[in-house]
Image: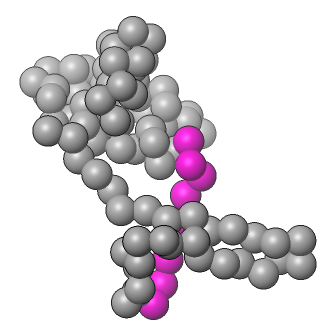
């Protein structure tokens, strides 16, 4: 079972005007939005899917994470290989 985070694209033009691109109108009734870089959004979605599949033993072994460390480093800390991540991307 894959977990899905509803998302849309926020686009900024040359003048700095921001537009919401939401073809499925998922956010039609929303008043406020949060912008997240697309690669970070994909990472968050993959991590949620990993949490749902994980036995949580690895999570206890992660330990303290420095504030300046990117979220992507959690994959390595949890013991995922490149092949594991590629397989998760195929499921995504």
Q: Residue at x 49, y 31 (%)?
A: 72
Q: How is the image coloured?
A: one colour
Task: Report the residue at 45% width, 90% height from top.
Answer: 31
Count of picture labels: 0
Q: Quadrant of residue 39?
A: top right
Q: What is the quadrant of the N terminus in the image?
A: top left
Image x and y of residue 26, in percent: 37, 75
Q: Is residue 80 visible?
A: no
**Magenta-tinted stretch:** 31-39
The residue sitting at 71% across, 78% down in the picture is 18
Residue 24 among magenta residues: no
Give the image location of residue 62, x and y in percent: 31, 24
What is the chief secondary structure element of the magenta stretch?
loop
At 55% from the left edge and 34% from the top edge, which residue is drawn? 69
Residue 76 visible, this angle: yes
Q: Position of residue 21 (x, y in %)?
A: 57, 71
Q: Is residue 31 left or right of residue 91?
A: right
Q: Is residue 36 magenta?
A: yes
Query: 40 above or below 7?
Result: above
Give the vertical position of 23 relative to 68 (above or below): below
Q: Percent from the top left, x then y, of residue 92?
A: 34, 35
- The answer to which image quadrant residue 65 occupies is top left
Q: Nearest the camera: 61 or 48?
A: 48
């Amino acid at each position: 079972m894959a977990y899905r985070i509803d998302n849309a694209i926020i686009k900024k033009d040359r003048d700095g005007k921001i537009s919401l691109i939401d073809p499925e109108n998922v956010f039609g009734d929303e008043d406020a939005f949060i912008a997240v870089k697309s690669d970070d959004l994909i990472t968050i979605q993959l991590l949620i899917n990993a949490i749902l599949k994980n036995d949580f033993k690895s999570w206890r072994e992660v330990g303290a994470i420095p504030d300046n460390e990117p979220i992507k480093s959690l994959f390595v800390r949890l013991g995922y290989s490149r092949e594991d991540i590629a397989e998760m991307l195929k499921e995504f």
